[in-house]
Image (cartoon, rainbow, N blue to C red):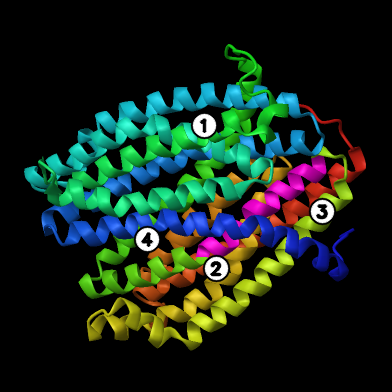
Amino acid sequence: MLHFRLSRLREDVPALLKLAGPLLIGQLAVIAFGVLDTAMTARYSAEDLAALAMASAIFISIYVGLTGVISALAPIAGQLFGAKRFDEIGEEVRQATWLAFGLAILGCIVLLNADYLLTISRVSADIEAKANLYLNILAIGLPASMGMRVLMALHNAVSRPAVITVVQLIGLALKLPLNLLFIYGGLGIEGMGGPGCAVATAIISWFWLIITLSFVVFDRFYQPFKIFSRFSAPDWHRIWTLLKLGTPIGFSYLIEVTSFTFMSLFIARLGTTALAGHQIVANLGTVIYMVPLSLSIATMTLVSQSIGANKPERAEEIGWSSVFFTTALCIVIGISVWVFRIQLLELYDPPMEVKVFSIPLFLFIAFYQVFDALQVAAAFILRAYRVAFWPMVIYAGSLWGVGLGGGYLLGFDVLGNTPNFLQGANGFWAANSISLGLAACLLLYLFRKTAARFEKTHPPLQV
């Protein structure tokens, strides 16, 4: 039985927006990093831009997978916060830090030996060298990034995302001058081109960690958690608990990233115009996606806290309120994107042939947002219940199987019976939209079953 009631929206939506607002601003600030890197490197040289594109694709895949594992701390600490078992939060943070340290070592090994991955591209030696240098520099900042993800998970769990947002905005303010200094040179420093972006990012990563850690050390709010009250050796049981939840989450993130990466690679076969049009639409879709993502992270926090407080009915109510509100909001966004598609295209100012190619793709964005909102909301609610394995399987089957596989069949008319409208890039976007719709249906069904089972059993909180 669903416990969702429309009357609950008055209570749940303001609480969601209070948490999601800072998260959205922070997410957009992080996206702005990539925009600045791309725009500023493009003015330096085409070779540096190509190196940046290659290196950033490799780094994002590694980074998303590793940080996804650490994000398991958020629902675990959220349940403890709801149960008012504050001192145990400190122990979970310490164990998550050990896990982050181990994953950082693994990530650094890959980044420092990325030449094996770069050789696959068969680009010129100069571009490969620049991309390799970019990744080597980012390896210096990776331990700080992993540590920062632990602190971000903590702040999300205890309903203090605004702290992270302020730190991210300060980092964004530093990004422009640091990029200028290291890309183009100045103050006696020789310009590095694309790899200069990595230097700026590594510096800011350590800045973020130091300033956020200082805040946690000195602010009285964090004292009940006793994070720094004692030293903890690795507790393999707790680390294994984090890994059991975090590894499927990390793989889920990786599936999402790689599905879009391969989609772009396939569309690249259709020519420069097709790839350019796809990139514009994909970039716009990424920005819009930050809205349901922020609301979903906020939902996970509130549902986790309700579960920890032994209020299973309230947890389900919050979940369904979020599904309803997030989807309704994204329907409005989708319609707006279609209505203002010409004006949005003008912001990118592409060549006329790219504009003509891109316009039909906006129809898919309108539908895409609705399905995306449903699936991401359901996925994060399930993480609050510590359910991540089956969502990972659902993502793999839908995004890789239906999305990529179906897109390949439609886009390249493999079977010879694809309508003209669904050939080319349209086919990939149509299949991707269908795959998200399928994932949403399965994840919502899983949420309903999980919530019903949880209410019947009322298991004690185990960490």
| Residue wearing tag 4 | 263
The residues tagged by marks 2 and 4 sit, at their Cα atoms, a distance apart of 14 Å
- Residue 415 appearing in the image: no
- Which of the two discs, 1 and 4, labels the residue nearer the N terminus? 1
**Type of the residue with mark 4:** Met
**Type of the residue with mark 1:** Ser
Q: Which one is in front in this view, the residue at disc 3 or the one at disc 2? A: 3
- Which of the two discs, 1 and 3, labels the residue nearer the N terminus? 1
| Residue wearing tag 2 | 434
Point out the stretch of residues depicted in magenta.
289-307
| Residue wearing tag 3 | 316
Q: Is residue 160 above or below residue 295?
A: above
Question: Label 3's element?
Answer: helix
Counting every numbered tag in the picture gives 4
Task: Mark 1 and mark 3 in contact? Answer it, CB < 8 Å.
Answer: no
The residues tagged by marks 1 and 4 sit, at their Cα atoms, a distance apart of 42 Å
**x then y, percent, for residue 339:** 50, 88
| Residue wearing tag 1 | 214
**x then y, percent, for residue 360:** 40, 83
